[in-house]
Amino acid sequence: MTIDDLMLQRGEWLQGTGPMSDVVISSRIRLARNLANYPFRNRAGESDLAEILRTVSEAALSCRSCKDATALDLDPADPLDRQVLVERHLISRQLADAPGPRGVVVTRGETLAVMINEEDHVRLQALRSGLQIMTLWGEINALDDELAERVEFAFDGQLGYLTACPTNLGTGIRVSVMLHLPALKLTNEIVRVARAAEELRLAIRGLYGEGTDAVGDFYQISNQTTLGKSEEEIIEEFGESIIPRVVEYERAARQALIEKRPVQLDDRIWRAFGNLRTARIISSEETLLHLSHLRLGIATGRFPKMDVKELNDLIMPTQPAHLQKRTGRTMSGEERGALRAAFLRERLHHLN
Amino acid sequence: MAIPCQACEKNSACVHLTDIRPSGEAVERHLCESCAMKEGVAVKPHTMSATVLEEFIKQGLGLKSLAERVCPQCGASFKDFHEQGLLGCPYDYTAFADLLKPIIEKAQEGAARHTGKTPGPSDENARRQATLSRLQRSLKQAVEAEQYEAAARLRDEIRTLEER
């Protein structure tokens, strides 16, 4: 499997399926692990990193969980290919940009990924559309067990899994859910969600994680503390209590918009549609903003021209790296904007 | 987005309260740490924060040598960690245990003990041990909160597990 093969797929985070998919885009669990007998990544030399990359890649590829997986060597890879992986949520920006030997093992369905030599030696990732945290835990836990039979992880009876940064110590678990919260944003109720999240020691971020703003009303909520609770406790609290409440809140806000401000709501939706099908130059941020409003229109039954899958199929191809990869060359921002607008017009042309 | 303290109107508020009036009306209040303490609002006593620690290190109040302590395994000093936010190797957690303890507690909401999974195929014994320590922690919390019914239930659960 190559990057080109991946490009032919929809991408797991954009399947548009799974529980609560009217609000929950995707769920993700990451586990931070380090090999016991090496310095952490920032203090490891080139040869250590190369050895870690080889050891972990081979171990991961021999796991049953990864039987259809491919190992991608990221250091020599084309920066555009690395960016494609970031856009597909298969690797972090940090792994794409960091220097030195590093890589990722990805399954064909894009649901499991093993990042190697990110901030920690190993970052396991399980990703699925909709709210499926329990399923993800089953999958990532099995992969973690298999890996632990093949390599020795740094572990301490008192402190748990030892990580380069103490904020990941213990379980090393990071549960993240990507939510589409346009109605909470429109009604400014999002401020309350942010405040509640802060009190619950949760982080709220934008589409591409740490240090990114919320573009197109897509928000990522994740746990901050990793020590003192078991993985199951963290997951249960998150998946059965916190996220369903935010989902209910967004649904109620959508209902209120339909009942109290239907004209304003329709105005947003149809202007978004108008912009997308007439623009001659459009950035990926503006595209996401309008697609977000169309998605709200689909979810509220006020924009029957498309379904969520058709809408999702406009997101990935209009991302900068995917756009350039399909064209086969790197382009300036303006050139990309024109190409993106042409692509959108062509896709939306038949909808009248 | 710092909210100013509503009492002194000087410091930025870090304590956010929702008072429920007898009428049932909810009123939000924002106070700074010292005004909150003055008003008798419970504020969790601070463990030594990273910034306080940094001050100590900078002032070199005999702690200078602590910052320069070096991990015998990887050669990283505690100062390196302080500057980069990242440790040098797994052994740093042992070499700098005393210095990391308050930092870990601050980052992890006061938690100091792992109760989750252990590496390798399911180790029944370790799992039992983890469950035990989790129950003991809950028991302690229940006693502190004077929830005696819950405490009794937890105590029974711990006994059953210990006898197995």
Image (cartoon, coloured by chain):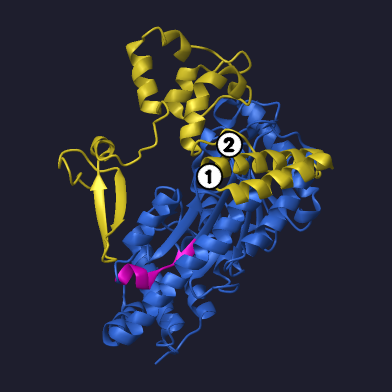
Chain colours: A blue, B yellow
> Mark 1 and 2 residues: CB-CB less than 8 Å, in contact?
no
- Chain label for disc 2: A
Most distant residue in the bottom direction: A352
Assign a secondary structure to mark 1: loop
Number of callouts in the render? 2
Marks 1/2: CA distance?
Answer: 31 Å
Picture quadrant of residue A284: bottom left
Whether A185 is among the magenta residues is yes
Three-letter code, disc 2: Leu
Assign a secondary structure to mark 2: loop
Picture quadrant of residue A320: bottom left
Q: Say whether residue A61 is left or right of residue B98.
A: right
Three-letter code, disc 1: Glu
Residue A50 image offset from top left, x and y in percent: 66, 33
Most distant residue in the left direction: B9
Q: Is residue A219 above or below residue B95?
A: below
Residue B78 image offset from top left, x and y in percent: 49, 18
Q: Say whether residue B147 is left or right of residue B128.
A: left
Q: Tell which of A31 and A73 is nearer to you.
A: A31
Q: Tell which of A75 and A64 is nearer to you.
A: A64
Q: What residue would you read off at disc 2?
A: A169
| Stretch of the chain drawn in magenta | A178-186
Q: Is residue A96 visible?
A: yes
Residue at x 30%, y 71% (from the top left corner): A186
Return the mark for residue B146.
Answer: 1
Residue at x 43%, y 76% (from the top left corner): A251
Most distant residue in the right direction: B164
Q: Is residue A48 above or below residue A279?
A: above
Both labels 1 and 2 in a single chain: no
Q: Say whether residue A81 is left or right of residue A134.
A: left
Whether A55 is among the magenta residues is no
Image quarter of the N terminus of chain A: bottom right
